[in-house]
Image (cartoon, grey):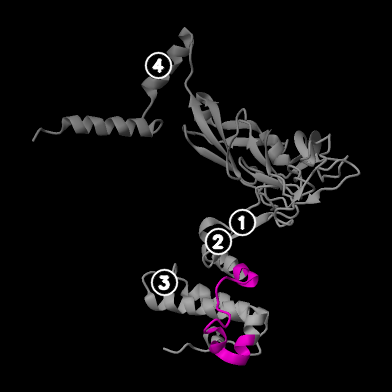
Amino acid sequence: MSKRDYYEVLDVARTADEAELKSAFRKLAMKYHPDRNPNDSEAEARFKELNEAYQTLSDTQKRAAYDRFGHAAFEQGGGGTGGFSGDFASSMSDIFEDLFGEMGGRRSRSNNGRERGSDLRYNLEITLEDAFNGKTAALTIPISISCEPCSGTGAKAGTKAKTCTTCGGHGRVRATQGFFAVERTCPHCQGRGEMIENPCPSCSGSGRTTRERTLSVNVPSGVDDGTRIRLAGEGEGGLRGGPPGDLYIFVSLKAHSFFQRDGADLYCRVPISMVTAALGGEIRMPTLSGKEKIVTIPEGTQTGKQIRLRGQGMPILQSRDFGDLYLQTVVETPQKLNARQKELLREFDGQSSADTQPESDGFFSRIKEFFSKPAD
C-alpha cells in the first residue's frame, strides 16, 4: 500500500510554515491519540501516520528532501525517519499536557523562582452593636513580607541569582520516551530556574522576613456571623519577589445579652407581670440604634404573643433597608406571695368565668366531655 502525501496527512498546504504545521499536527494528534481511542486500530494507524508526517516536515532538511524527491528520499538509506526533532518533541509534550492536564491539574510554572505568597485567615470577633453600626478595626498580624535588604530576591546585596545550568532557567527538564516528551521539575533548582550562590543573611535566601503589621479594616454595618472580608495583597509575601497573597477576615458575632439575631431580624424575649398581661400597659424597650421605644402591651396578652417593631432590626448589608425587631412576651407567674396576696388570688379565681379565662375553661370542658363519653 502506497503512502499518502505527508501534506495531505496533516491537511495543510505545501506552503505551510512551521506554526501551521505544528497547529495542524496538534489538532489531529489529539483527535487520534490511542488514549482517546482505546481498542481502535484505525485511529492508532492514523496516529502513527501523523507522527511520521510531522517528524519529516518539522525538520528543515528532511522537508527539503521530501519536497524534491517525495517518499523516495527516505527509501534505501535516503535519510530515514528515526529519532525525533526538537520541535517534534516539544509539540508532543504540549499534546501530552493538553490530553492529561485536566485530569492531573496543569502545572504551575515558576517565573524565575518567584512564587505568589499564601493567603492568610484572621478571625475577628465583634459585638452585635459593632455589626449594627459598623466599625474600623485595627489588626496586628504577624506576616511574612518581602525582605528589604535583598529586595525580595533572596540573594545577598550586591549579588544576583544565576541561571540554573541544568534546566537553562526553565525550571523544568524534559525526557523523551517513545514519541512522548515528558517534563518534570528540575531537581537542581527545584523548579525555580535559578540558583542563589550567596543567600541574603537576613532572609536565608527565601526573599521574605516575618514582621508584625497593623492593618486598618473597615467592617461595614450589617455584617453577619461568617461574613468574609478580603484584603487583596495583604497576605503572606511571595518568595523571591513574588506577589503577596490575600488576607481573608472571617467575622463572628459575640452573644448579646438579650437580642438574638436571625438574618436582618432581631428577637427579644420580654417577661411581663401577670397584672400587665391582664390589664395591659406600656414597657420601655432599648434598640441597637440607641433610641428607646415605648411599646404598648394589649390587655389580655398571653405568653408567646409577638409584637413587631418595624425597621428596628439590623441594617441589610449594602442596602438602606432594615430588618424588624420581634418582642416575644412571657407572662411571669408570681412567686413567694404573702397571705393577703394569696387570699386575693383565690377570691379572683372563685369569681372567674369562661369570659375571663376562655382558653383554660374551654380546655377543661373538653376534658370533662372526653371522660363522660360512654365506653364502646
| Residue at (91, 44) in percent of width and height | 158
Badge 4 is on which residue?
346
Q: Position of residue 20 (x, y in %)?
A: 64, 81
Please give the range of residues in magenta: 65-90
Q: Is residue 216 at all visible to an observer of this figure? A: no
Amino acid type, residue under disc 3 in the picture: Asn
Q: Nearer the viewer, residue 254 or 298?
A: 254
Specify which label sits upstream in the sequence, 4 or 1: 1
Label pair 3/4, CB-CB below 8 angstroms: no
Specify which label sits upstream in the sequence, 4 or 2: 2
Badge 3 is on which residue?
37
Q: Nearer the viewer, residue 124 or 81?
A: 81
Mark 3 or mark 4: which is in front? 3
Specify which label sits upstream in the sequence, 3 or 2: 3
Q: Total marks drawn?
A: 4
Drawn side of residue 159 relative to residue 303, left or right: right
**Mark 3 nearby-residue class (10 Å; few <14, some 14–19, many ≥20):** some
Amino acid type, residue under disc 2 in the picture: Gly
- The CA distance from mark 4 to mark 1 is 85 Å
**Mark 1 nearby-residue class (10 Å; few <14, some 14–19, many ≥20):** few
Label pair 1/3, CB-CB below 8 angstroms: no
- The CA distance from mark 2 to mark 1 is 8 Å
Q: Secondary structure at mark 2?
A: helix
